[in-house]
Amino acid sequence: MDFTQLSDLCDRIKSMERRLDALEKKPKAKAQTESNRTLWATFCIAHTGRYGFEPVRNAKVNKNISELNKRVGLDTACKLVEYYLKQNDAYYLRRYHNISVLLADCESMVTRMKTGMVITGRQANQIELVSTNLNQSEIFMRGKSK
């Protein structure tokens, strides 16, 4: 066997290894693709229900759908999308429930969905004010005890 034949054989082996790697990856990729389709359909239905038309779909949106699916799993992601599109938080409303906003907030939104706790901006300000007053009282009391 000369050098050319040996080189050809190596090339064929490398090609076969690449095809084998691709075949091993396909089932996982196919399952992920199906999950993403399901999640996209859920998002479309919820968005259309809220706004009367389907959301824009492009490479960025597809990536966000895939990332959301990876971060919280399909079942939670589908419930989360439906929950998200029912939210009347000013921040979400001003962004027309963009999927990238949900992705940015997905872990806290899961907590919100599971606990049923929704804290409005006004409530957050009141909690912050009470906390500030408590801190000031503690500082005052420490100064008085010296």
Image (cartoon, grey):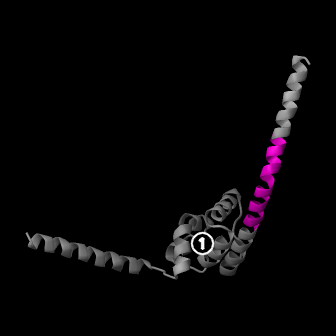
Q: Which residue is mark 1?
A: 97
Front residue of this view, candidates 50 and 126: 126
Magenta segment main secondary structure: helix
Q: Is residue 116 visible?
A: yes
Magenta region includes residue 124: no
User: Left or right: 8 with respect to 75?
Assistant: right
User: Left or right: 144 with respect to 96?
Assistant: left
Q: Is residue 88 visible?
A: no
Residue at 39%, 77% in the rendered image: 124
Relative to 14, say whether 59 is above or below.
below
| x and y percentages locating residue 29 in the rendered image | 76, 56
- Label 1 amino acid? His
User: Left or right: 45 with respect to 101?
Assistant: right
Front residue of this view, candidates 23 and 135: 23
Residue at 91%, 22% in the rendered image: 5
Residue at 59%, 72% in the rendered image: 96
Relative to 82, say whether 105 is above or below.
above
Magenta region includes residue 31: yes
Quadrant housing the N terminus: top right
Q: Secondary structure at mark 1?
A: loop
Residues rendered magenta in the picture: 18-37
Image quarter of residue 125: bottom left
| x and y percentages locating residue 128 in the rendered image | 33, 75
